[in-house]
Image: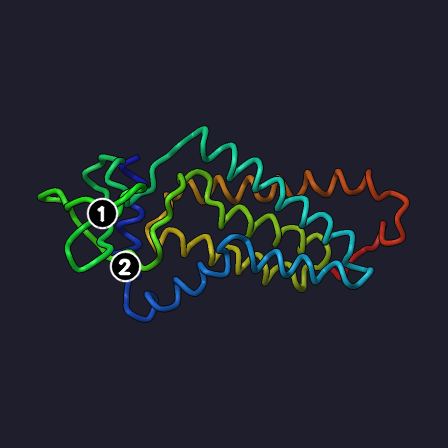
Amino acid sequence: MNWEFEFLNGIQDMFRVPLMDRIMPMITKLGDGGVFWIIVILLMFIPKRTRKYAHVGALALLFGVIGGNLILKNVIARPRPFWLENGNPLARLAVTDLASRISVHDGTTVIPEGRTVMQLLVKPPTDFAFPSGHTQASFAAATSICMWSRKWGIPALCLAALIAFSRMYLYVHYPTDIVGGLISGVAYAFLALAICNKLFRNKPWDGCRGAK
């Protein structure tokens, strides 16, 4: 656990500047609730050539909600890095107002003496940390897009990677939360592809080769 806080603190010390403080919340917002990716997947239902992969992306996102957000997060119940409850002295506590109070998952409390604090740039998440839902949804959708077209899939994967990095920059996820979200998101996309290949074997859009 210590190495993860050292990694997150290193990101803060090396990259945190006013410009990044403006950009990273905007990037992370693209992953809020998976809404951006849901819109992209819905648009892919319109052309026949992308419809199969729209089904793949939609199913992969559904797997992420059930497997990641509803099951894994609550079973593992891992505290966020900025929560007081994690108890690690390397953890930086998030200042959420000018009264020198910190965010915890169910309210606020006075900052303990001797602890390092930082300003949290986004609304404090109240759910558990593992896996990263933003990362999971982003890579599930981006992998589905990449299955159809590398031309569009590679930029989608790059955006997914930026969203994943933003979660660490904003100090709301550990590195292993990101890795877990990435692996599960990609796995859900391939599982969804296998299911769709069977379910839609005789559909008119089956067998489309994509625009590699």
Q: Residue at x 43, y 65 (%)?
A: 26
Question: In front here: 211 or 169?
Answer: 169
What residue sits right under mark 2 in the picture?
14
Q: Residues within 10 Å of mark 2 (few under 14, many from 20)?
A: few
Residue 87 position by quadrant? top left
Which tag is nearer the camera, tag 2 or tag 1? 1
Question: In front here: 153 or 128?
Answer: 128
Residue 170 vs 193, above or below: the answer is below
Q: Residues within 10 Å of mark 1 (few under 14, many from 20)?
A: many
Residue sticking out furthest to the bottom: 19
Answer with left or right where residue 194 lies relative to residue 78.
right
Q: Amino acid at mark 2?
A: Met
What residue sits right under mark 1 in the picture?
93
Provide residue 159's location: percent of width, then percent of height: 53, 60
- Quadrant for the C terminus, please: bottom right
Provide residue 57's location: percent of width, then percent of height: 67, 50
Query: Cα distance, mark 2 to mark 1?
Result: 18 Å
Q: Amino acid at mark 1?
A: Leu
Q: Residue at x 88, y 48 (%)?
A: 203
Provide residue 5's location: percent of width, then percent of height: 28, 43
